[in-house]
Amino acid sequence: MQITRNSLQTTPGPTDWFTGAVYIDTIATPFAPSRLGAASVHFTPGARTAWHTHPYGQTIFVTEGIGLCQRRGGSVEIIRSGDRVFFEPGEDHWHGAAPDRFMTHIAMQEADDSGSLVTWGEHVTDEEYSAASS
């Protein structure tokens, strides 16, 4: 058993990966033999990820608020506290807060053999987001 005391600072989400104000609290980092990475991600209203994929897929569990998510080519889905979303391995997608609500989720994904948890793509444009939230 290993207990890690909460000593990590809340980290602002990098602007290369997010639009709007996003804050990340690390929960788990891959440490062999485990491949699990997990974080609590806090989105302010209108904030969202860029398009991205995960080598082994990703599960998000919404803990607070209302959000939106979409896979490339699919319809936008509204997600609420208690909802779980699984994105398939390699599935291009984004997720974030609704325009007028905060949203927090736990993001869980596994690293590949090179240690990569995610491959980031282009930002979801304001036009894409506005169309999604109308």
Image: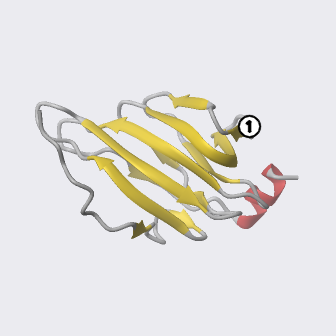
Tell me which colouring the rendered structure shows.
secondary structure
Q: Answer with the quarter of the image where residue 115 lies.
A: top left
In this view of the protein, can residue 55 be seen by the observer? Answer: yes
Residue marked by disc 1: 77
- Total marks drawn? 1
Q: Find residue 67 and report its horizontal and vertical position in percent.
A: 69, 47
Residue 48 to residue 112: above or below = below
Which residue lies at the image location 62% right of the left edge and 47% below the top edge?
64
Seen in the image, is 22 located left or right of residue 76?
Answer: left
In this view of the protein, can residue 54 be seen by the observer? Answer: no
Q: Find residue 33 and report its horizontal and vertical position in percent.
A: 12, 30
Which residue lies at the image location 70% right of the left edge and 63% below the top edge?
45
Q: Amino acid at mark 1?
A: Glu
Seen in the image, is 55 located left or right of residue 32?
Answer: right
Quadrant of the snapshot with the N terminus: top left
Q: Find residue 43 and report its horizontal and vertical position in percent.
A: 59, 59
Residue 58 to residue 47: above or below = above
SS type, badge 1? strand
Which residue lies at the image location 32% right of the left edge and 68% below the top edge?
9
Which residue lies at the image location 45% right of the left edge and 50% below the top edge?
40
Q: Sort mark 1 into few (<14), some (14-19) or many (20+) by Cα contacts within 10 Å.
A: some
